[in-house]
Image (cartoon, rainbow, N blue to C red):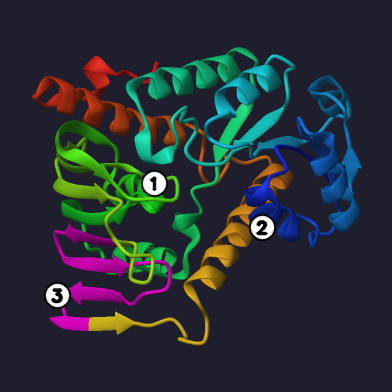
């Protein structure tokens, strides 16, 4: 099945993580729109595909899906303008939207994200998110082992996360432990960090809809030379610990009393793993289009991630726990 894939936003993320893989796919035709058309022209010259001078022209082309890869600071406007034109499917970079950048998501970003999802529902447009951390070798292996060994229900979660990985880490909590129901957060007095990640440290305690409890720390005070996130998921029958994009996966199996360590080849860098996860995410998404099935990561999870961040911000501002479904409902 031949697919037409439209792309809105042809910046660095698009060039490094998306188009190189899409251009290798058989029976995929690419179409680009960028506010600065010369950037789209450069993309087409390097990787092939068509350039369109407007969103109307792109959607009139009849794409099977449109990937919205603009900066998160511009994504709300781009998404709403695109959805007004009634595309069949839309795939979003993460986070779904963040006017002040991914390290400084505000409550309003959640409401903007909700407006995007409501507009998509109104237009009967199918939505999907990238959340490629689900496609890391270690994440996929951990998910499989938890199921195969019948570890049972999640009990506890702990996380230490650099803001560069923040929305992904929240999504991994959802992926392994289910949606967060209630959250209580505190923040440091001063911001720290650099390179677009200047933000206050936050520490949040939460409870999931399934009854698991957890804590997660967000910070920009971690060196990029060392692991950027550590997550531990404790289940009734064991626990798994993941560290960074290419770190070891530790599995503690209570039934066999075994402590196992799964290691990725050290000849492969964290950034190679990172790049490969985009390919896996895109291949899975394109296959869902061909098969007419639900996207591997539906757009709802992008809104749920923003819901958690909005709950954190409200909790910090008002000094109390926030019940997400009551105060920040998805619909």
On-image quarter of the C terminus = top left
Q: Earlier in the sequence, mark 3 or mark 1?
A: 1
**Residue corresponding to mark 2:** 16
* CB atoms of marks 3 and 1 within 8 Å: no
The chief SS type of the magenta part is strand
**Residue corresponding to mark 3:** 255
Q: Earlier in the sequence, mark 2 or mark 3?
A: 2
**Residue corresponding to mark 1:** 197
3 vs 1, front mark: 1
Give the residue at x 86% y 57%. Answer: 46
What is the magenta range?
230-259
With respect to residue 53, does 291 lie above or below? below
Indicate the position of residue 148 as horizontal and vertical percent values. 33, 67
Q: Secondary structure at mark 1?
A: loop
Indicate the position of residue 155 as horizontal and vertical percent values. 14, 52
1 vs 2, front mark: 1
Q: Secondary structure at mark 3?
A: loop
Give the residue at x 33% y 22%. Answer: 107
Quick check: 134 left or right of 292?
left
């Amino acid at each position: 099945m031949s697919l037409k894939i439209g792309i809105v936003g042809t910046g660095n993320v698009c060039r490094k993580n998306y188009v190189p893989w899409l251009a290798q796919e058989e029976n995929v035709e690419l179409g680009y729109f960028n506010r600065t058309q010369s950037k789209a022209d450069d993309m087409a010259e390097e990787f092939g595909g068509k350039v369109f001078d407007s969103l109307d022209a792109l959607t009139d082309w009849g794409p099977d899906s449109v990937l919205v890869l603009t900066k998160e600071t511009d994504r709300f406007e781009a998404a709403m303008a695109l959805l007004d034109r009634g595309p069949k499917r839309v795939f979003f970079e993460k986070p779904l939207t963040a006017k002040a950048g991914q390290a400084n998501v505000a409550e309003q970003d959640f409401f903007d994200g909700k407006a995007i999802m409501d507009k998509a529902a109104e237009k009967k447009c199918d939505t999907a998110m990238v959340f490629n951390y689900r496609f890391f070798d270690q994440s996929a292996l951990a998910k499989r082992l938890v199921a195969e060994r019948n570890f049972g229900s999640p009990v506890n979660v702990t996380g230490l996360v650099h803001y560069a990985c923040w929305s992904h880490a929240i999504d991994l909590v959802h992926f392994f432990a289910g949606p967060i129901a209630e959250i209580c957060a505190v923040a440091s007095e001063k911001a720290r960090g650099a390179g677009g990640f200047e933000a206050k440290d936050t520490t949040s305690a939460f409870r999931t809809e399934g009854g698991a409890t957890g804590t997660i720390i967000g910070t920009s005070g971690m060196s990029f030379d060392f692991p950027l996130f550590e997550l531990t998921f404790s289940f009734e029958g064991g626990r798994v610990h993941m560290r960074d994009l290419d770190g070891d996966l530790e599995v503690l199996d209570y039934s066999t009393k075994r402590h196992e360590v799964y290691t990725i080849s050290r000849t492969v860098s964290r950034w190679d793993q990172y790049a490969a996860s985009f390919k896996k995410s895109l291949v899975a998404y394109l296959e869902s289009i061909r098969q007419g099935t639900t996207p591997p990561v539906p757009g709802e999870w992008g809104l749920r991630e923003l819901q958690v961040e909005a709950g954190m911000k409200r909790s910090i501002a008002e000094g109390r726990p926030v019940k997400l479904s009551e105060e920040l409902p998805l619909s």
